[in-house]
């Protein structure tokens, strides 16, 4: 492994450790020295990778925000099948990559008042609710999804997914629910 690859591996280890600690302890309760000790490395060495705890949070929130773009890639797939397929892939990927559960939790936390403002703005700017509402509107036009405020239905859909991801982050043995159960929230 080259020096550059080693540095990138260590950077990833710091990010994943910070993600886990931010979710388990909370951002404000986690100290940079806690992250360094858990990696393990000295606090001084950690500062060679990230200048501050806030910079770590920002990097994680940017990663989480980037992952939300998958909802925009529907194409010509019927809306209900798109959501079922998306959830199947999400749950499968998260089971293979458990940090995904923690990322959902962190993104939810990052949107709250009291978090560093730049991270909060990024977390609030993902547009997932609005893009999902547009897909719901397509399903409403075809009669597959229930009538009503598409944005509110989108909020309910994502609140359900968020809750499931939080539960699965706490309980590694929990099986993913059938995506059809979740999509049924939207169905007419």
Image (cartoon, rainbow, N blue to C red):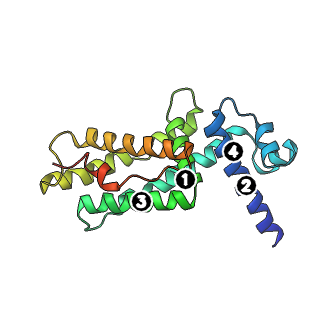
Residue 90 or 150: which is nearer the viewer?
A: 90
Residue 104 or 134: which is nearer the viewer?
A: 104
Q: Are marks 4 and 2 in contact (CB under 8 Å)?
A: no
- Which-is-in-front pick, marks 1 and 3? 1
Residue 135 appears at what percent x and percent y? 26, 54
What mark, if any, has residue 100 been given in the picture?
Answer: 1
Q: Residues within 10 Å of mark 2 (few under 14, many from 20)?
A: some
Q: Are marks 1 and 4 in contact (CB under 8 Å)?
A: no
In three-dimensional space, the C-alpha distance between marks 1 and 4, rounded to whole angstroms, equals 13 Å
Q: Residues within 10 Å of mark 4 (few under 14, many from 20)?
A: many
Mark 2 element type: helix
Q: Residue furthest top?
A: 114
Q: Residues within 10 Å of mark 1 (few under 14, many from 20)?
A: many
* Label whose residue precedes the other's in the sequence (4 or 2): 2
Mark 1 element type: helix
Query: Considering only vertical position in the picture, is 31 above or below 87?
Result: above
Residue 159 appears at what percent x and percent y? 38, 40
* Label whose residue precedes the other's in the sequence (1 or 4): 4
Q: Residues within 10 Å of mark 3 (few under 14, many from 20)?
A: few
* Label whose residue precedes the other's in the sequence (1 or 2): 2
In three-dimensional space, the C-alpha distance between marks 3 and 2, rounded to whole angstroms, equals 25 Å
Q: Which residue bears the numbered disc 3?
A: 70
- Which-is-in-front pick, marks 3 and 4? 4
Q: Which residue bears the numbered disc 2?
A: 13
Q: Are marks 3 and 2 in contact (CB under 8 Å)?
A: no
Q: Which residue bears the numbered disc 4?
A: 18
In three-dimensional space, the C-alpha distance between marks 1 and 2, rounded to whole angstroms, equals 15 Å
Left or right placement of residue 125 versus residue 179 in this view: right
Mark 3 element type: helix
* Label whose residue precedes the other's in the sequence (1 or 3): 3
In three-dimensional space, the C-alpha distance between marks 1 and 3, rounded to whole angstroms, equals 14 Å
């Amino acid at each position: 492994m080259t020096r550059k690859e080693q540095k990138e591996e260590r950077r990833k280890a710091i990010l994943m450790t910070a993600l886990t600690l931010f979710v388990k302890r909370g951002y404000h309760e986690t100290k940079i020295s806690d992250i360094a000790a858990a990696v393990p490395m000295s606090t001084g060495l950690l500062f060679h990778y990230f200048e501050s705890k806030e910079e770590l949070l920002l990097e994680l929130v940017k990663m989480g925000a980037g992952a939300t773009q998958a909802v925009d890639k529907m194409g010509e797939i019927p809306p209900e099948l798109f959501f079922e397929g998306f959830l199947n892939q999400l749950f499968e990927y998260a089971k293979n990559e458990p940090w995904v559960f923690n990322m959902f939790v962190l993104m939810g936390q990052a949107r709250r008042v009291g978090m560093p403002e730049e991270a909060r703005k990024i977390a609030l700017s993902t547009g997932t609710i609005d893009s999902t509402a547009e897909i719901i509107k397509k399903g409403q036009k075809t009669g597959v999804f229930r009538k009503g405020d598409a944005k509110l239905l989108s909020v309910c859909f994502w609140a359900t997914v968020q809750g499931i991801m939080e539960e699965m982050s706490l309980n590694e043995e929990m099986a993913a629910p059938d995506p059809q159960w979740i999509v049924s929230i939207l169905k007419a």
